[in-house]
Amino acid sequence: MKQELLFFERDTFYEYKEQKKNEGYTIVSINDFLKNITNNYSFDEFDYTSQIVDISVFGSGYYKDAQSLG
C-alpha cells in the first residue's frame, strides 16, 4: 500500500473492507495493532504492502483519550 490516508464512509465500511480484501489487502484496526505491539509484536512483522491500519476509532468518540488505546 502506498503511504496515503484513505477515507471511507462509516456506512459502507464493510463493503470497502471487502473491496480491499479482493484487491489483496487486509484492514487492521489500530486498537488490535497496538495490542499486538504490547505483546512483543515487531514493526518488522507489519506488512506495509498488504495491510491497512484503520484509525477510525480515534474519531468515533468511543475513546476520550488516545492513551486508553495503548
Image (tube, rainbow, N blue to C red):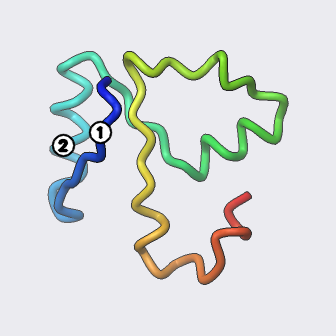
Q: Earlier in the sequence, mark 2 or mark 1?
A: 1
Q: Is residue 2 left or right of residue 49?
A: left
| Few, some or many residues within 10 Å of mark 1 (<14, 14–19, 20+) | few
Q: How many marks?
A: 2
- Are the two marked residues, 2 and 1, in contact with CB atoms closer than 8 angstroms? no
- Amino acid of disc 1: Glu
What's the residue at 47%, 81% (across, down)? 61
Viewer-side label of 2, 1: 1
Mark 2 secondary-structure assignment: helix
Residue 66: image location, x then y, percent: 64, 70
Please report the residue visible at 42 percent of the width from the left and 74 percent of the height from the top.
Answer: 60
Query: Residue 62, percent across and down?
Result: 52, 78
For the N terminus, give its image quadrant.
top left
15 left or right of 29 in image: left
Outermost residue toward the front? 3
Q: Amino acid at mark 2?
A: Tyr
Q: Label 2: which residue?
A: 16
Q: Quadrant of residue 33?
A: top right
The residue carrying mark 1 is 4
Q: Residue at x 81, y 41 (%)?
A: 38
Label 2 environment density (alpha carbons within 10 Å; few <14, some 14–19, many ≥20): some
Q: Which element carries disc 1, helix, strand or loop?
A: loop
Quadrant position of residue 56: bottom left
